Image: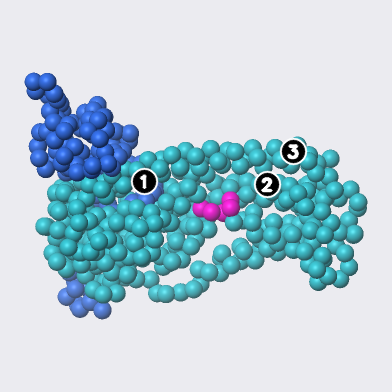
Amino acid sequence: MLRFPDLALGELETAVLEALWTHGSMKPAEVHGAVGRPDISVNTVSSALKRLSDKGLLTRDKVSHSYVYRANITRSELQRQLIGAIAAQFGDTGGQGLLAAFVDIAEERGDDSLRDLERLIADRLEEGDE
Amino acid sequence: MTDLLELALFSAVVIGALAWLVVAVVAPRRRPAQGSPVARTFLARAWLYAPVWVPLVVVAAALMPGVAGALGLLPGDHCLSHPASHHHLCVAHPPEEAGIWMTWALPLGALGVALAGLVVCGRRAWQQWRLARVLIQLSEPSSFGPDVRLIDQDAPLAVTLGLLRPTVLLSTGLLSRTSPGALDVVLAHERAHVARRDTLLSFLDQFAAALFPARVVGRLLADLTLAREQACDAVAARSTGRARVAAALAEVASLNMVTPAVGLSIAAGALEARVMHLLYPPAPTWRWVLAPATVLVTLVAAGVGPGHSVIEFLLTFLLH
């Protein structure tokens, strides 16, 4: 499970990840091209790549004279870890901070109690809802 | 005038500390809140923010005799009836002695402790905000409008995330596995959170709660979360009917039992409370206003009457 500083990615870092998710393995210069930001140098992209691989989000392989990077985590997995980290941030206080979820997911709830509720709701729908 | 400020600040901190103590002792023993979400939200926030609003009310009320006297609204001069050595909470006769270390040390010490709690909370809040920004960046646009974005998750998730312009995030698993009717309910519910600025308010509540130990305010925060969800359920029910909202809740909850997702958590039993509130809404009443109104009137009366004298006595006693 990744923690706060590793998951707090900058704009360039998410752009780099997006590029690698779309194109697979790439060299820094190719990533730079895919990110499509002429205001940012290849060196800046390289250091973003380095940071991401230090965090374990990318894997790098040496191919001839340069490194080739690929994503070590899927978009879905990264999103899952982010949601977990956001929800856990105030989890111990009973509050949620800046998050509001439709239904709780970790709630302790038996199958039976849900069946009972569903029966009540079905009865009401049959009677005709207001 | 700084002398008056010094004494008012001193009094406010002493009263704030007393209010804090009352909340810390009484709030965990409170009966479970009843009534409409509006009533329960108001009452829970009244407890949570008591260390802030109680001293403001009492000190403002305690300053009233002095202000009224200065404006000539009261017959005779209130302050002249006191001995000369007496510290006045008065605009026209500001306290004579000031710059006493205790009147600064005590409030600053108390505010320092409060500030430490707020800083710890602020650090967590900042981290949560940073993570939320990354998640929103990694989400993709949806066909529901610019305020709704998609995340690539099998678990059926619907969250509202952010502070000033919150974003609704729906998971692909939710879209593929819920009925269109339930999806309408989910969207109406989440958009109600956005319209009500719920995430911003909860964020502020989190700071107020940081002034207390978690076991004191855990239930107040849980009450607030439940009331907020029920209020959004009610907004969604305006277009679809209450039983359909309840059905959508049960539908999404049953999907979550199949794929338990990341540790999102609201108060235990919240689902049941929400379904019951939808199927059997409590009769609307304003009777709940009586208790907080009584408290407010008592605090103002205490501030103007005995509070004024007690504060002045306390000041005189502590400063000599």
Query: What's under tag 1, amino acid-wise?
Result: Trp
Prevailing SS of the magenta stretch: helix
- The residues colored magenta run B48-52
Residue holding disc 2: B14
For the colour blue, the matching chain is: A
Q: Badge 2, how many Cα within 10 Å: few under 14, some, many 20+?
A: some
In the rendered image, residue B304, in percent from the top left (x then y), is placed at 74, 62
Residue, disc 3: B102
Q: Chain of mark 1?
A: B
* Secondary structure under the numbered disc 2 in the rendered image: helix
- Residue with the mark numbered 1: B129
* SS at mark 3 in the image: helix
Q: Nearer the viewer, mark 1 or mark 3?
A: 1
Residue at x 70%, y 64% (from the top left corner): B301
Same chain under badges 1 and 2? The reply is yes
Q: Mark 3 and mark 2, same subunit?
A: yes
